[in-house]
Amino acid sequence: MYNMFLFPSFYAHVLSAILLLLAAGVFSYHFTLVRGMSAQTLIGLLLLASIAMGVHSLSHLGLEMAYNYNPLGALFAPGKRDS
């Protein structure tokens, strides 16, 4: 068996999740400013958010394929191991 905390991709995934949560917090804190932006700026923000979510989801796929580890499975079934 291997220790998941030894793989750099795990930490990259965690950092990506923290940055996404931070961005969501900043977005919600400054919602009145965001609401007043032009349509073109809002489209740019949505595209940037979709790129960030896509990269984060690709790291989920990479963790599952390379290390046979599902980070969501660790949250919802901590005692259960993937086979």
Image (tube, rainbow, N blue to C red):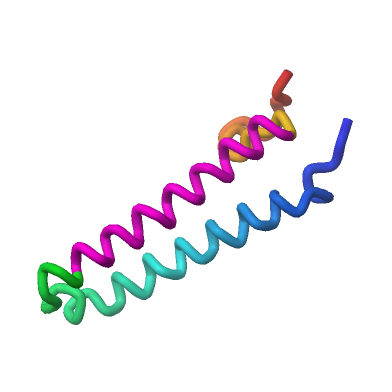
- Residue drawn at the location 57% of the way across and 40% of the way down: 60
Residue 54: x, y in percent?
Answer: 43, 47
Q: Quadrant of the N terminus?
A: top right
Q: Quadrant of residue 46?
A: bottom left
Residue 10: x, y in percent?
Answer: 70, 50
- Residue drawn at the location 71% of the way across and 29% of the way down: 68
Q: Is residue 77 left or right of residue 1?
A: left
Q: Nearer the viewer, residue 12 or 47?
A: 47
Q: Is residue 1 left or right of residue 69?
A: right
Q: Which residues are magenta?
A: 42-66
Magenta-colored segment: predominant secondary structure: helix
Q: Quadrant of the C terminus?
A: top right
57 falls in the magenta region? yes
Residue 49: x, y in percent?
Answer: 35, 59
35 falls in the magenta region? no
Q: Is the residue 57 above or below the residue 38 in the image?
A: above
Q: Is residue 64 left or right of residue 33?
A: right
Number of numbered discs present?
A: 0
Q: Is residue 74 left or right of residue 2?
A: left
Q: Is the residue 28 above or below the residue 73 in the image?
A: below
The residue at the far top in this view is: 83
